[in-house]
Image (cartoon, rainbow, N blue to C red):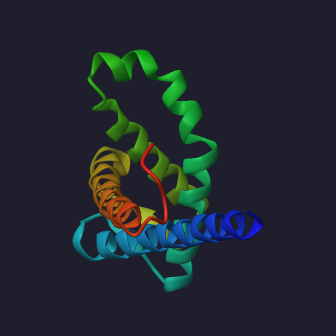
Amino acid sequence: METARNQLEARGVAALILTFLVNLAALEIASNFVPGVEITSFRSALLAAAALALASYLIEPLLYLLTLPINLATFGTFSLIINGFMLIFVALCVPGFHLRAMFWGLLPAIVTALMISFFRIILRRLLIQARMITKK
């Protein structure tokens, strides 16, 4: 029984590492293809991916709770704005990661958030197929 629990914990850690790597890859791809997203070094990309993961686990649930009425009224599309602001927050905190252009960087942030969400969906499906995580 103890080995089964250890295997589940190892799978959870592996899934967390893969999610971090997906965030990192999505940020790097966004910096190459989305105008207004700038990452000056690989170290900055690592820090931005880590800060984004931390913000997603600590701050994002509270934001979703606070904006629940408007999110329900917009059928969930306000989530794009929340994710965009999370990226702007990370860009303000991480040196070497910048969001520039129109609307104070909100447009590039939303496009980058869409890319990250797309890659996370693909990763989640792959992890479910590999039985590293379960459907919720």
Q: Is residue 131 above or below residue 81?
A: below
Give how far across and how far down residue 13 sits, in percent: 62, 68
Q: Is residue 25 left or right of residue 42?
A: left
Q: Quadrant of the C terminus?
A: top left
Q: Quadrant of residue 3?
A: bottom right
Give how far across and how far down residue 102 sits, in percent: 27, 49
Residue 95 is at least partly visible in this image = no
Q: Residue at x 34, y 19 (%)?
A: 72
Residue 26 is at least partly visible in this image = yes
Q: Is residue 19 left or right of residue 71?
A: right
Q: Residue at x 27, y 77 (%)?
A: 32
Q: Quadrant of the N terminus?
A: bottom right
Q: Residue at x 35, y 53 (%)?
A: 113
Q: Is residue 72 above or below residue 81?
A: above
Give how far across and how far down residue 111 sits, in percent: 26, 54
Q: Count the numbered circles shown.
A: 0
The one of 93 and 62 positioned closer to us in this rendering:
62
Q: Is residue 107 above or below residue 124?
A: above
Give how far across and how far down residue 92 sits, in percent: 55, 56
Q: Is residue 25 above or below residue 116?
A: below
**In the orientation shown, which residue stands out farthest toward the bottom?**
42
Q: Quadrant of residue 62?
A: top right
**In the orientation shown, which residue stands out farthest toward the right?**
2
